[in-house]
Every structure is written in C-alpha cells, then in structure tokens.
Amino acid sequence: MALLVATVATLTERLILPFAAAACLAVGIAAASYALTRAGARRIVGATAAFVAVVALVLLVVVNDSLLTVLLVLALLAIVGASTRYALGRDMAALKASPTPGMAVAAAAHPVLILNPRSGNGKVERHALAEEARRRGIESVVLEPGDDLVRLAVDAVAHGADAIGMAGGDGSQALVAGVAQQHGVAFVCVPAGTRNHLARDLGLDRDDVVGALDAFAEAVERRIDLARVGDRVFVNNVTMGLYAKIVQTPEYRDHKVETVLELLPAMLGPGAAPFDLRFTGPDGNEHLSAHVILVSNGRYELTGPQAFGSRRRLDGGTLGIVTAEFSSSADLARFIQLQAVGQAGRFRGWINWTDTRFDVRSAAPIEIGLDGEAFTLERFECASHAARPVCPRPRRRRGRAGPRSPRSCRLPPVGPWSSSIDEGGELMKVVRNVRTRKESG
C-alpha cells in the first residue's frame, strides 16, 4: 500500500509540474502585458508580478530536479526543428545547381549607383562600395545631407543611365525604384541599410553587399510589385494605429524603448480612446477601430516561426492586410501567447486577408508609418495590380562554398502609372521595374 501511495504521489507530482510551469508562464505574460499598458505604480506592480512569476518558474524547475529534463526537451525540439527545415529545404549544392528563373539581359551600358553613406551604420564606407563601383566601371553618386534623392535619380536617368541602383535602406530603395519604373530603366537593389527587408524578400544575400553590384553585369530580369501612397513609393508596408502613432514622436528614433513604454499606457490602458480607423473586413462587415492595421506590398508570413515576417512572393498583385484590436491587457497577453506558438489566427481580434483594394476612413488626418517613416494622410485608399516576375541566375564561384551570389533581376517598362495620385493621399499598388539578385537560402 505504501508503495502504491508513493507511486501515485510521484506520478501526481510529475503531472502537476508541467501545469504549474505553464501557469507561471501564463501569469508572467499576463503581468508583463498589464505593465506595458499601465503607468506609474500599477506598472511597477505588474512588472514585479511578472518578475515573481519568472522566478517561480525557475525555482519550480530547479527544486524538482527537472532542469536536465527541460534542457533535453528543448534540445530535442531544436533538433527536430532543424531537421524539418533541412528536409523541407535544399542544400547548398542543390541551390547552386538549380536554374534561376527569369529573362537573361546584357550588362548595363551606363550603370549608376547612388550611395547613402549614413545608411546601415556606415555600410557604404565599411564595404568600400564607391571604390568597388569604380573598379567595375559603375558611376557612383553620393547622397549628401540636404540632397533630394529623387532628383539625383532623375538626373542620372537624364544623363543616360540605363540601370540605376541604390545602396541604402528600404525607404531609399523605394524612391529610386519608383524613378526607375517611371523612366523605363532597370533598378538594382544593394542592401546597405539596417534591416534590408526588400533585399531579403527578393532573395538577396544581405551579407554580400559588394556582391550585389554584380547586378549591373549580365543579369536576369524579374518584375515585382511596388506601392505608392501620396507621392511616395514604398516597398514593404504601411501601418496605422499603435506603431504609426509611436513613430510620429520625434524621440522615437533615438529612444525607441523609452518612447514605447511611455506611449503604450495612453493607447492601450483603461480609458484609452479608440483609434478612429474605419474599414471593411473581408466578410463585408464594417469595423470602427483597430489598434494595428498593416497593409503590405504582398502578404507577410505571420502565423509561424518558419520565415516569420517574410513574403513568399512580390509579384502576386495583391495586398496583404492585417488588423488587430485589443479590448484589454488580458487580450494583449492572450495574443502574445498565441503568437508565440504560431496560432495568432485564433485570436478573436485578429484578421488577416488579401485583397486588391483596401480603404481606411477617419474624421481626422490618418497617421501612418511608411516603411518605418512617419507621414500623415487626409485619406487612405489602396488598390493592387499584378506584375510578371523575372529572376536572377547564379554566379559560379571557386574555392570554399558560400552562399550563391545570383545575378540581378531587372524589369522592362510597363508604361505609365496605373492610377493618378491626388493630394488626398491615394495609395496605389502598381508594377515597377526592378533589377535584383537572388540569395541561396
């Protein structure tokens, strides 16, 4: 009997332990969410509760001698994840041997590269891009403080450039890509910014900044979608709601965390005024508000850790649209928990769909974050048009195997803008000319 009781007690303890650990984790997330949406003493209380929950979780594992078990489980999960990615992916040799889709084109006759020396914490200078461009016969133009980037690109085309590149961040890439499309010349993306989201989604090796200059040589063309809001072209996304409000603050650029912590309680806490952002959902129902609205140039992968935040294609001619609304800090905690396990779609305030048009209405000017930059519009209207992609081919290398350094992609002209853009800030997703390179994986 004593043995039976001891066995039952041991099994009960082992069964209760995972639930207790999960409860500590849930309390920690809930308390942290509460702290984010409160200020003053209540924020301190929430942060303290979150800290206590984390400490309790650690003690629970250590006291019950489960640390080794937990570490083994985590290691096995990591092995399973890596094995799955390898099984579903392709190895380096296969990537190098695989054909690159697209239309082969000759080297640019008059290539021009615009350099932003302030992007990416000085990547232009660190990689000696001006010298590398000169060595390859590429004319380089340095963007100086006070210069008009669009004017520099237009002048380059006026002086005979048939392929124009931009070494800088996504905002700069978008402006030069728009000029290239308008004038029917090729565009080269050189990932010299901080995040280089466009380069990533185009398949470029973001670490091979110098190799991107190969796009001016014999290359392969591809056509992708770009978007326009007001008189600005963007390549990634436009946001409204929380993030858009935060980036409007001048302090955000130099003090991001402090600014977010200061502003969130007023936007998510009790008594916070809802955002006046009215839109029609995919089911035809009218929505009066949302804390987050994301309209992207192509749909983002947002429901799992695999390729999270990336776009599978940039030529689908559709807009990715995501909206989220949180009624309380508990809602925010629930969303964080679901997102952590790749189940954000189960959150009741989350809507994710694609469409060819999306409008947002408001009684006040609409604050937006356009590729991370702050702007204000009188109205927000968005439409989409399809594009035909063309992609690069690999460059053979000798010596140690490294990432495949593909050739560029370049787009033939597609004619005038698909829609006029008026002073109200109409957003139109249109086809642009692009010349890029492709990464191996």
Image: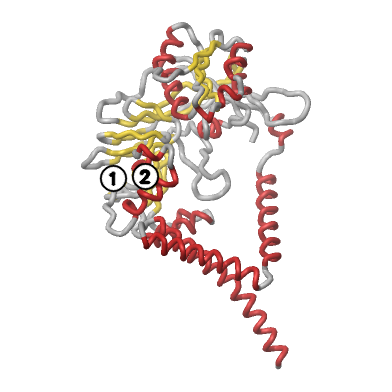
Name the image quarter holding residue 241: top left
Quick one: label 1, few (<14), some, or many (20+) residues within 10 Å?
many
Residue at 40% across, 47% down: 260
Vertical side of 353 occupied by 225: above or below:
above
Mark 2 / mark 1, whichever is N-terminal: 1
Identified by mark 1, the residue type is: Leu
Name the image quarter holding residue 89: top right
| Residue 282 vs residue 115, the one in the foreground | 115
Vertical side of 309 occupied by 339: above or below:
below
Identified by mark 2, the residue type is: Ile
Residue furthest bottom as drawn = 1
Q: Which mark is residue 411?
A: none
Asked if labels 1 and 2 touch by Cβ distance under 8 angstroms, the answer is yes
Q: Secondary structure at mark 1?
A: loop
- Residue 350 is situated, as x and y percent measured from the top left of the image, at 40, 52
- Residues under labels 2 and 1: Cα distance? 9 Å
Judging by the rendered image, the residue that carries numbered circle 1 is 277
Residue furthest left as drawn = 363
Judging by the rendered image, the residue that carries numbered circle 2 is 293
Residue furthest top as drawn = 159
- How is the protein colored in the picture? secondary structure
Residue furthest right as drawn = 399
Report whether 232 appears left or right of 57. left
- Residue 71 is situated, as x and y percent measured from the top left of the image, at 68, 61
Q: Quadrant of the C terminus?
A: top right
Q: How many marks?
A: 2
| Residue 204 vs residue 222, the one in the foreground | 204
- Residue 382 is situated, as x and y percent measured from the top left of the image, at 34, 34
Q: Is there any visible trace of residue 69 in the rendered image?
A: yes
- Residue 256 is situated, as x and y percent measured from the top left of the image, at 43, 42
